[in-house]
Image (cartoon, grey):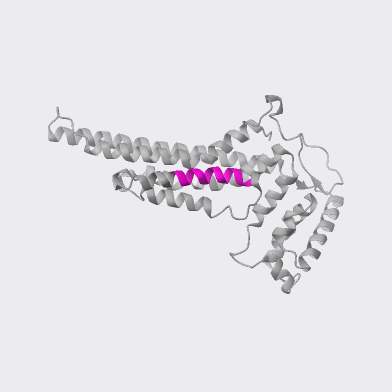
Amino acid sequence: MSVYIGSVRTSATTAQNAAKVAAEAARRATRDYSAARTHLDKHLSPDGNREANRRAAQGILAAASADAQSQRARNRAAVDYLTSAAAEVRPKIADTADALAVARGDWDNIRSRIDRGTSIPALLEGATLGEALAFEKWGPDLMASKTPAPGPALDRALQGTTDDRPDYSALITERLAALATPDVAEVLRAAQAAPRQVAAADPYLRIMHDIAHAPLTMLDAAIESALVISGSTSDESDEDSESDDNATGNTARAALGSALQDRHPANFMRDRSTGLHRELINAPKSEPTTDATSAPSL
């Protein structure tokens, strides 16, 4: 699969704007539906007005549902593309005996630091590429069981064994992005953020699918959307890695503010590219080497 930075940015923008687009569409549809049901034409009889309103309302319901389906499909395509692009350019441990041996050495270094009480977030923050990939490969087994190194050191390293543990996959991705070329880093971070950004649009799309029965108010949707974003950014401290989430969070907060201004139930409802010649960002596959890691480069 060829990965193009222009396509990555288009998909990333779709994901980043998903909540804003859905919120605006849901607000417009709910207001139009309310207006259609109450519109009075002085040239029509009461029965004529009721029939005209019914037809207009039905048209708005059908259009809103179709728009929601279209947005869902567009958002899903954006996430799918970014996920595939990230899988293509993400650094990997080469599938050779020598590379695996080097990776095992990196893992041994990590294990010794964990045994000395180094927290996993701190470990990943300063990890080399090989160490980050080694932790990605063997770390989940360590977290799933304390058997390999029982004791307080591992307890401190894991920082808890249930829901209070940080999202290590996000920390690994951020470290890989920090060590990657700018374009590869952009792909990795966009793919990491996209599912959450798209999920923030879902409350508004649920409204659009069924405006007549009001599954939730616009205020409810704004709060739920904001919670999707705010509940998932605490583990990312790097300024660049936070930019996409901050933008989506700002969208959610703006939608929440707009909903708070209109409480009536009827109404709740530097492009960084330097040229096209840099579009292809993943290099052709090369023959396996004895290096422990391999990473696409420009």
Q: Quadrant of the N terminus?
A: top right
Q: Residue at x 52, y 40 (%)?
A: 75
Describe residue 268's horizontal placement relative to residue 200 as left or right. left
Closer to us: 234 or 112: 234
* Residue 183 position (above or below residue 203): above
Queried whether the magenta region covers residue 229, the answer comes back as no
**Picture quadrant of residue 111:** bottom right
* Residue 8 position (above or below residue 232): above
**Picture quadrant of residue 63:** top left
- Residue 201 in view here: no
* Residue 218 image offset from top left, x and y in percent: 37, 47
Describe residue 64's horizontal placement relative to residue 40 as left or right. right
Closer to us: 94 or 7: 7
* Residue 206 image offset from top left, x and y in percent: 40, 46
Closer to us: 127 or 289: 127
Range drawn in magenta: 241-254
Q: Main secondary structure of the magenta part?
A: helix
* Residue 79 image offset from top left, x and y in percent: 57, 42
Queried whether the magenta region covers residue 242, the answer comes back as yes
Question: How many numbered discs, if any?
Answer: 0
Q: Residue furthest left?
A: 45
Q: Residue furthest top?
A: 276
Describe residue 158's horizontal placement relative to residue 285 as left or right. left
- Residue 32 in view here: yes
Q: Quadrant of the C terminus?
A: top right
Describe residue 145's horizontal placement relative to residue 57 as left or right. right
Q: Residue at x 69, y 58 (%)?
A: 121
* Residue 108 image offset from top left, x and y in percent: 82, 61
